[in-house]
Amino acid sequence: MPVADPDLVERLRGGDEQAFAEVVRLWSPAMLRVARAHVRTHASAEEVVQDAWLAVLRGLDGFAARASLKTWIFTVLVNTARRRGRAEAGRVLELERPGVDPRRFRGDDDEYPGHWRDEAAPVEWGPEPEVLAAEFRGLLGRALAELPDRQRAVVELRDVHGFDAEEVCTLLDLTPANQRVLLHRARTRLRGLLEEAIA
């Protein structure tokens, strides 16, 4: 069942368990990662996702389709996660490490200031692209897991799940500038982690 199915909302409202199970299967992993950015523990995030799905089921008749179903569900999730986070007396503030060493970028006097230096360019793939691609996906998954929760939530919503910047700001209650900073830090940190692993 494609999640872009125009009849999906009606199928869900009609109690189609197969449609609901498929949507839960497809979106719950991303929801868990987003919830984790708002609560202290993985167990709390799992409970938030369950509570969000219950709220979705209860509120489905009120869904007015002003946004996509996915955006609405993630909004329900974020609201649920925020309430839970406040109940847990707020999140522990995480210290974010700087992205990458500034010397890895071209200087102000360069023809392309701020661009990566040539030695920081991506490594060419070898002759075994499928094997390397699978290995790379594993490396990427491990690198994503090492990001601070808020950075991981932003980069996954933008780059993995295809949300636009405005949707991410709404879902995570971020200003556009903060979303850009978190996305930049996440991408540069991922690049550094992946380069270390590939080198």
Image (cartoon, grey):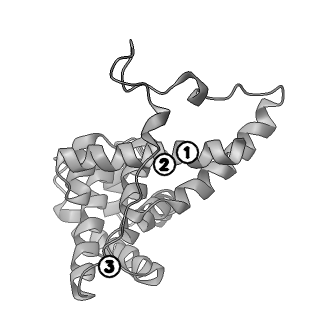
Identity, as a three-letter code, of the amino acid under mark 2? Arg
Identity, as a three-letter code, of the amino acid under mark 3? Val
Percent coordinates x, y for residue 136 in the rendering:
69, 43
Which residue carries the number 2 mark? 189
The quadrant where residue 133 appears = top right
**Real-space CA distance between mark 3 and mark 2, rounded to the nearest whole angstrom:** 21 Å
Which residue carries the number 3 mark? 92
Q: Are marks 3 and 1 in contact (CB under 8 Å)?
A: no
**Sooner in the amino-acid sequence: mark 3 or mark 1:** 3
- Mark nearest the camera among 3 and 1 is 1
Q: Secondary structure at mark 3?
A: loop
Q: Secondary structure at mark 2?
A: helix
The C terminus sits in image quarter: top right
Q: Are marks 1 and 2 in contact (CB under 8 Å)?
A: yes
Q: Nearer the viewer, residue 41 or 92?
A: 92
Q: Nearer the viewer, residue 171 or 40?
A: 40
**Real-space CA distance between mark 3 and mark 1, rounded to the nearest whole angstrom:** 25 Å
Q: Which mark is residue 192?
A: 1
Q: Nearer the viewer, residue 82 or 101?
A: 101
How packed mark 1 is, by other alpha carbons closer than 10 Å (few <14, some 14-19, many 20 or more), is some
Instruction: Name the residue at 31% across, 59% down.
Output: 74
Horizontal relation, residue 19 to residue 91: left or right = right
**Real-space CA distance between mark 1 and mark 2, rounded to the nearest whole angstrom:** 5 Å
The single residue placed furthest to the right in the displayed view is 127
Q: Which mark is residue 180?
A: none
Identity, as a three-letter code, of the amino acid under mark 1? Gly
Q: Nearer the viewer, residue 72 or 151?
A: 151
Horizontal relation, residue 11 to residue 174: left or right = right
Instruction: Name the residue at 48% across, 27% down.
Output: 116
Percent coordinates x, y for residue 54 in the rendering:
33, 76
